[in-house]
Every structure is written in structure tokens, then in C-alpha cells.
Image: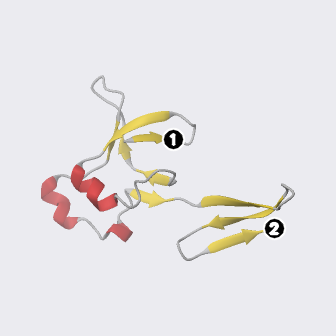
Amino acid sequence: MDLEDANARRMVMNVWMDDYLRWRDELKKDNMLSILVRPPSGGFNTLTFKSVPKRERKNLPPKEDDLRIEPMAKQVIEEEPDGTSQGFELLLDKNIVLSLS
């Protein structure tokens, strides 16, 4: 999976299929996420999603409480028809939108 970090550096992240199936709704293009990863090692230049061993998967918390992937707030800038910005909305949660003017 290709991703871009906060410094606009493009990297590749490996994700196991069972983790991908659990997080497929979040792991989509243009989603801003905080992801726990293992750094590149062994001469490879790829990150690895921090998965748990198969024998410990039964002990995973529900997806909502699993902190390995957390959605981050998206900034939405509203523009007027003349091209000026009057403020912006900050999407904090699926149900909470903070509007600033």
C-alpha cells in the first residue's frame, strides 16, 4: 500500500490480509490516518503495519478501541463564489463538525 507521511514523503507499507479486511473502510485514498507501523529493516525500504501474532488475535479489542489506526481530523475550507474564504469546518468525528469563522 502506498502512503504519504506528514512530511509529504511517499512510502510503501505492507499490511497483512486479515488486518486489511479489518481496516478496509479506513485504508482508502485521501483518508488522513494515524497508523502504528514498524520501521524498515533488513535492507528493505518498506514500513510494516503493526500487526499482532495470529495466536493473540482473539484478544484484540473491538475496532473502535483498537489504537493501531486512528482517523485524523480533515480540514474543509469553504470558499465564496468570489474565491475568498470565510472560514472552515473541522471534521472532528463522523458526528461532530467544528465550524470556525
| Residue lying farthest to the left in this orientation | 55
Q: Which residue is mark 1?
A: 5
**Residue 45 vs residue 58: left or right?**
right
Q: Residue at x 27, y 58 (%)?
A: 21
Identity of the amino acid at label 1? Asp
Q: Residue at x 30, y 71 (%)?
A: 62
Occupied quadrant, residue 69? bottom left
Look at the numbered disc 2 and give the secondary structure of its residue: loop
Instruction: Tell me the quarter of the image containing the N terminus.
Output: top left
**Foreground residue among 53 and 6:** 6
**Residue 89 vs residue 73: left or right?**
right
Q: Position of residue 9 (x, y in %)?
A: 52, 34
Q: Residue at x 79, y 63 (%)?
A: 87
Point out which mark residue 53 bears: none
Crowding at dot 2, Cα within 10 Å, few <14 / some 14-19 / many 20+, comes out as: few
**Foreground residue among 89 and 42:** 89
Occupied quadrant, residue 61? bottom left
| Residue lying farthest to the top in this orientation | 43
Label tally: 2
**Residue 74 vs residue 50: left or right?**
right
Q: Which residue is mark 2?
A: 101
Q: Position of residue 34 (x, y in %)?
A: 47, 53
Q: Position of residue 56 (x, y in %)?
A: 17, 59
Identity of the amino acid at label 2? Ser
